[in-house]
């Protein structure tokens, strides 16, 4: 009964005395909107020749979604840089990307730091980037053990 009442309150179901009491009167709301429109028209806030119906339905014919055909989907997949539709079908889904170079990693960190620095309230993001950089930096530099002879110049 709770679910039925919720649906009735939301306007689903047959009209009856319970539904009329539970839901708002939509007809009166429309009349209130039209009255407000006429008030705006009387104070010259609305251009002449535009009705309330025109205002409400201004975007009724706007295309908001589009169904893609198979050919469109293949063209979109094929338009990915360097990937053809045949390549996309041949590659396994689990193919791993190459490991980024140290320069690419530092460039990505700089880009993220620049983005976070351009916005207010991103101190946590900047702290997280600094922590990440500290943990990754040893992996980015190739370290070899120095020999004792490296510190003495030859004569």
Image: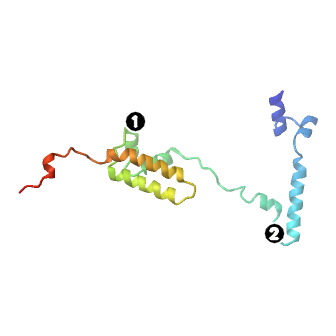
Which mark lies nearer to you, 1 or 2? 1
Who's the residue at 51% across and 56% down the image? 116
Label 1: which secondary element: loop
Q: Which mark is residue 27?
A: none
Q: Mark 2 points at which residue?
A: 46
Q: In which quarter of the image is residue 35?
A: bottom right
- As helix, strand or loop, the secondary structure at mark 2 comes to loop
Which mark is on residue 94? 1
Q: Residue 120 vs residue 104: left or right?
A: right
Looking at the image, residue 31 lies above or below residue 134: below
Q: Which residue is drawn at 91% across and 35% down?
A: 18
Where is residue 141? Give x, y as percent.
29, 48
Q: Circle 1: is it few (<14), some (14-19), or many (20+) Cα within 10 Å?
A: few
Q: Earlier in the sequence, mark 1 or mark 2?
A: 2
**In the displayed image of the protein, which residue is found farthest to the left?**
155
Q: Residue at x 34, y 44 (%)?
A: 99
Look at the image and tell me in which quarter the C terminus lies: bottom left
Which is nearer the eye, 30 or 49?
Answer: 30
Give above or below for 46 relative to 88. below
In the rendered image, the quadrant that contains the N terminus is top right
In terms of depth relative to the viewer, which is nearer, 72 or 77? Answer: 77
Within the image, what quadrant is residue 58 found in? bottom right
């Amino acid at each position: 009964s709770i679910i039925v009442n919720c649906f009735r309150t939301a306007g689903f179901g047959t009209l009856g005395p319970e539904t009329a009491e539970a839901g708002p009167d939509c007809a009166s709301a429309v009349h209130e909107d039209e009255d407000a429109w006429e008030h705006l028209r009387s104070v010259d806030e609305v251009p002449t020749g535009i009705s309330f119906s025109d205002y409400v339905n201004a975007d009724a014919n706007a295309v908001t979604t589009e169904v893609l055909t198979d050919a469109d989907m293949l063209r979109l997949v094929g338009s990915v840089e360097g990937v053809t539709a045949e390549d996309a079908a041949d590659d396994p889904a689990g193919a791993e990307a190459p490991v980024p170079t140290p320069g690419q990693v530092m460039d990505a960190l700089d880009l993220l730091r620049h983005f976070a620095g351009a916005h207010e309230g991103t101190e946590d993001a900047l702290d997280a980037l600094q922590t990440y950089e500290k943990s990754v930096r040893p992996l980015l530099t190739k370290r070899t053990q120095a020999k004792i002879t490296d510190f003495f110049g030859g004569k």
